Image (tube, rainbow, N blue to C red):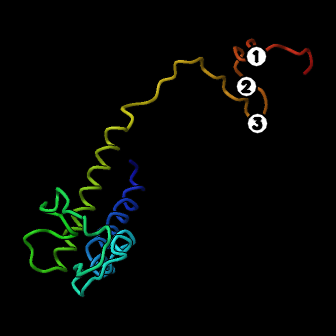
Amino acid sequence: MSKRQWPFLLGGLLVALLLAGVVSNYASSHPDGLDSSLLKGCTVNADDEITGGSCPAQEAKDHELADSPLADYGVRGIGNDFVSTGLSGVLGVLLTFAFGAGLFWLARRRGPATSAGPATPAAPSATGPTADPADEAATPSTGTR
């Protein structure tokens, strides 16, 4: 990677970390489209608990990874919701960046590309034919100059 690309890469990483660590705390706490469509037909209280009616959300179960360290957009064990959500976002960005960087590292070229095909002749210069006699011998003559 050239030295000119590093500031762009680091700037993008900084913006992603800032968005994940700070701005994510101000996201809407209202359910997204899937959650709200699953609650249609049910009566819900202020704590988003189903109190009556019939809806698909009544069949919902906890995910297998619900007890994982980064479940529910937070870090388990941290009591401050702002810090927990921000730290979860920052860890997610760093893990994703590390994974992507690893993939790019594996996919990068290991050296100059080699061509198995025939070499292509050099294009003639704009000032006229080349001065190399071998080039003139290789090109058919039309009889005119």
Q: Residue at x 81, y 13 (%)?
A: 140
Judging from the image, what secondary structure is the residue with disc 2 in? loop
Judging from the image, what secondary structure is the residue with disc 3 in? loop
- For label 3, the crowd category at 10 Å Cα-Cα, with few meaning under 14, some 14 to 19 and many 20 or more, is few
Q: Are marks 3 and 1 in contact (CB under 8 Å)?
A: no
Q: Identity of the amino acid at label 2? A: Thr
Q: What residue occupies the far bottom of the structure in this picture?
A: 46
Look at mark 2 in the image and give the residue it sits on: 130
- For label 1, the crowd category at 10 Å Cα-Cα, with few meaning under 14, some 14 to 19 and many 20 or more, is few
Q: Residue at x 13, y 60 (%)?
A: 68
Q: Identity of the amino acid at label 3? A: Ala
Numbered badge on residue 108: none
- In percent of width and height, residue 19 lies at 32, 73
Q: Residue at x 24, y 87 (%)?
A: 46
Say if 140 sits above or below 57 in the image. Answer: above
Gap between marks 3 and 2 measured at Cα: 10 Å
Numbered badge on residue 126: 3
Q: Nearer the viewer, residue 126 or 41?
A: 41
Direction from residue 85 to residue 53 in the image, left or right: right
Q: Nearer the viewer, residue 62 or 54?
A: 54
Judging from the image, what secondary structure is the residue with disc 1 in? helix
Say if 38 sits above or below 63 in the image. Answer: below
Gap between marks 3 and 1 measured at Cα: 16 Å
Gap between marks 1 and 2 measured at Cα: 8 Å
Q: Identity of the amino acid at label 1? A: Glu
Look at mark 1 in the image and give the residue it sits on: 136
- For label 2, the crowd category at 10 Å Cα-Cα, with few meaning under 14, some 14 to 19 and many 20 or more, is some
Point out the tag, 3 or 1, that comes first from the N-terminus: 3
Q: Are marks 1 and 2 in contact (CB under 8 Å)?
A: yes
- In percent of width and height, residue 84 lies at 16, 74
- In percent of width and height, residue 89 lies at 25, 68
